[in-house]
Image (cartoon, grey):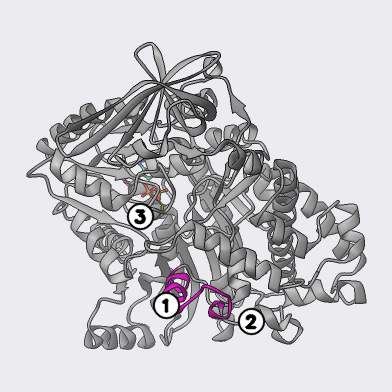
């Protein structure tokens, strides 16, 4: 959207809002929020729904519920080690329960005998009675007021409270009368979509689940439509783009296939043929290979680079991390030497010295090397290529859209091959990408030892720690995944910081490291390489490790709050183990008492096939599911979810195709705003 059309109050700094001083505006900035608009577009990650009050006799363990009860008997107050525990019995007409508070001795004064209060919290069963620990306490009248409403929960940073967030957002909504609509009104009517401004307001404060779903639908639709239109435009551009290079069948690449210690699978061979046909074809290639983790994409990349080298051109491969880039570089060098190949790889990464980089630039510019292995960032820099014909992006979870843009700016019309490990079901991939070239590698090389899985509750933790200790003693390494980085982001979920501190106490003598998305890239690289080198034995991390890292020596993956992740994401995480010659294990810790959560995780327990899991995910998740947890930045969509919104994606794609059939260049006046949305920064978006 262009700035000039924007409502002026949107571009003001958040500090213009009441109650936002210097300190809080710095905290907002940490969340990436500068302007009022940023704030409005920072959506809740979850909601607290204050459910109707239940009878004690109807309580179900594992659910969060509210009861209206009165104190019976005495309060018992006892110190246990450094905990001050307050326990009492409470009851309504239907039965009795136990309520416990830790380190909140003042609660004693808040609860008067003979009075009824509402307690809301997670229900557990302790002995024969239901129990709540640390429930929230409400006066009955106060609870009635918020009952049924959805209270937004924002992803926070330390020091910024959800309450302040809520207050600030409601102010922003009041001071901002509208956000400009950009969809044609016919489209809104036909697709039954909420007004944009209304959707943004309601996503923060939905009056009901239905309202939330409608707001979410509109916001998801925005993202999906933008994505699809951009992909369609891109495709059109490519159809007109001529292959500037002339490739002929190569002896070395074909010879390598014969001499590898393993036989390529049928699917690998098929995709290799597709790639060759593209490279030798009339138009420039833009192919996406989707293959499950461990399906053997790297060898296809290497073959393509070798084929390019033997045809006299340069090729480059970009990896998301330096560790992965280095891994590729080393394995490419080994193959080049072992099979006496003409390919000459060179490494180009940020941590190299200025002198090393300069030397690399020279070798690249002169054409002395023909296979550049590096990170995304470096290939964007001012490297002068010598006849660059192929660019591969590995594990980027995204289509080579940005890269295409960058390269065309440089006047290079290279072929692009993207490799992604997000198993999107084929049907969906085709809808999203149209008939852009997507190859699906859904056959695993034989001879793998399948990962052993288990889904267990938190009681199993001590056993799991002991198990990890044994694995570490055998010389192996482990991952523990927590959904959050630090305390206070979302209640009740494990966070990396506290978890690592506790794990250090539980496993003295074991070298434990931490990794999360808020670390500087250089810090992340350092942690990843010391894990790869075996200096860190257990790595406690958020889902940032989902991308890239390959440490065959790691044999245990333990995932906390695993019920909060999508199945496809769990599968990605699990794919970090089972990469070596030893038996690997995945431990899913389920902290939810809900039956659905258990059933969902059982799918993981019984299948190691990413495409099957993706299909199941598609079937199981309904539009009623809330956001869940995801790492922002890596995915194309913030609100939309390719699995959950499969139906909306189909509808949006159909609509977009009809729209483009009528108005191929979006020149009609009612489409002008849409054109602005998709026309600007055609290349500047993250595809899947
Ligand atoms: P990913 O698709 O996750 O990038 P890799 O390319 O890293 O997977 O492959 C994982 C492992 O499988 C590597 O050690 C590779 O050598 C091996 N591999 C690849 N193709 C085959 C095959 N056809 N048969 C046996 N092993 C293979
Ligand atoms: Mg790979």
Of the pair 500 and 249, the residue shown nearer to us: 500
Range of magenta residues: 14-30
Q: Which residue is mark 1?
A: 379
Of the pair 83 and 108, the residue shown nearer to us: 108
User: Which residue is pictured at 51% across the width and 32% down the height?
Assistant: 117
Q: Which residue is mark 2?
A: 11
Q: Quick check: is the Cβ at mark 1 less than 8 Å away from ligand 2?
A: no
Q: Which of marks 1 and 3 precedes in the sequence?
A: 1
Q: Nearer the viewer, mark 3 or mark 1?
A: 3
Q: Secondary structure at mark 1?
A: helix
Residue 280 visible in the picture: no
In this rendering, position of residue 417 left or right of residue 364 = right
Q: CA–CA distance between discs 3 and 2?
A: 30 Å
Q: Nearer the viewer, mark 3 or mark 2?
A: 2
User: Which residue is pictured at 73% across the width and 53% down the height?
Assistant: 215
Of the pair 365 and 73, the residue shown nearer to us: 73
| Residue 434 x, y percent position in the rendering | 72, 55
Q: Which of marks 2 and 1 precedes in the sequence?
A: 2
User: Which residue is pictured at 78% across the width and 53% down the height?
Assistant: 652
């Amino acid at each position: 959207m262009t700035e000039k059309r924007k409502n002026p109050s949107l571009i003001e700094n958040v500090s213009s809002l009441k109650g936002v001083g210097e300190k809080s505006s710095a905290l907002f900035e940490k969340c990436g929020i500068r302007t009022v608009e940023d704030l409005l577009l920072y959506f809740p990650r979850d909601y607290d729904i204050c459910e109707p009050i239940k009878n004690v006799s109807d309580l179900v363990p594992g659910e969060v519920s509210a009861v209206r009860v009165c104190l019976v008997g005495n309060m018992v107050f006892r110190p246990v080690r450094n905990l001050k525990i307050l326990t009492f019995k409470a009851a309504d007409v239907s039965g009795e329960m136990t309520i416990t508070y830790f380190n909140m001795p003042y609660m004693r004064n808040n609860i008067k005998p003979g009075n009824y209060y509402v307690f809301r919290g997670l229900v557990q069963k302790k002995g024969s009675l239901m129990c709540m620990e640390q429930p929230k306490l409400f006066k009955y009248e106060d609870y009635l007021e918020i009952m049924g409403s959805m209270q937004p929960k924002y992803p926070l940073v330390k020091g910024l409270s959800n309450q302040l967030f809520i207050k600030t957002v409601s102010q922003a909504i009041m001071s901002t009368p509208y956000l400009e609509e950009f969809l044609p009104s016919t489209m809104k009517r036909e697709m039954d979509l909420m007004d944009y401004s209304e959707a943004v307001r309601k996503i923060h404060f939905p009056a009901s689940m239905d309202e939330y779903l409608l707001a979410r639908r509109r916001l998801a639709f925005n993202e999906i439509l933008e994505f699809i239109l951009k992909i369609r435009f891109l495709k059109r551009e490519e159809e007109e783009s001529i292959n500037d290079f002339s490739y002929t069948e190569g002896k070395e690449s074909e010879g390598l296939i014969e001499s590898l210690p393993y036989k390529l699978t049928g699917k690998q061979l098929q995709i290799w043929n597709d790639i060759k046909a593209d490279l030798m074809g009339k138009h420039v290639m833009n192919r996406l290979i989707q293959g499950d983790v461990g399906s053997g994409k790297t060898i296809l990349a290497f073959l393509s680079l070798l084929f390019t080298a033997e045809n006299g051109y340069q090729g480059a491969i970009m990896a998301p991390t330096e560790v992965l880039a280095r891994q590729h570089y080393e394995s490419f060098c080994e193959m080049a030497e072992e099979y006496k190949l003409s390919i000459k790889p060179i490494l180009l990464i940020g941590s190299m010295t200025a002198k090393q980089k300069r030397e690399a630039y020279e070798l690249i510019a002169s054409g002395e090397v023909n296979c550049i292995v590096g990170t995304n960032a470096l290939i964007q820099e001012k490297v002068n290529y010598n006849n660059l014909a192929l660019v591969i992006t590995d594990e980027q979870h995204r289509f080579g859209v940005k890269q295409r843009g960058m390269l065309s700016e440089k006047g290079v019309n290279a072929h692009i091959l993207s490799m992604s490990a997000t198993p999107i079901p084929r049907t969906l991939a085709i809808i999203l990408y149209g008939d852009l070239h997507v190859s699906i590698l859904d056959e695993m090389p034989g001879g793998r030892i399948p990962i052993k899985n288990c889904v267990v509750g938190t009681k199993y933790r001590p056993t799991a720690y002991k198990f990890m200790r044994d694995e570490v003693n055998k010389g192996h390494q482990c991952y523990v995944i927590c959904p959050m980085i630090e305390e206070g982001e979302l209640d009740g979920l494990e966070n990396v910081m506290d978890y690592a501190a506790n794990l250090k106490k539980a496993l003295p003598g074991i070298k434990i490291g931490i990794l999360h998305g808020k670390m500087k890239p250089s810090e992340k690289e350092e942690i990843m390489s010391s894990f790869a080198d075996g200096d860190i034995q257990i790595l406690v991390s958020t889902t940032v490790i989902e991308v890239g890292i390959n440490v065959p020596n790691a044999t245990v993956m333990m995932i906390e709050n695993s019920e909060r992740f999508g199945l496809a994401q769990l599968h990605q995480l699990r794919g970090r183990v089972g990469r070596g010659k030893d038996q690997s294990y995945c431990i899913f810790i389920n902290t939810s008492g809900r039956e659905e959560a258990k059933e969902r995780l059982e799918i993981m327990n019984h299948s190691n096939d990413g495409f099957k899991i993706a299909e199941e995910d598609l079937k199981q998740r309904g539009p009623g599911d809330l956001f869940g947890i995801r790492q922002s930045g890596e995915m194309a969509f913030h609100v939309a979810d390719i699995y959950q919104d499969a139906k909306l994606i189909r509808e949006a794609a159909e609509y977009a195709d009809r729209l483009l059939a009528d108005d191929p260049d979006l020149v009609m006046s009612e489409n002008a705003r849409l054109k602005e949305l998709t026309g600007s920064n055609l290349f500047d978006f993250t595809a899947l």
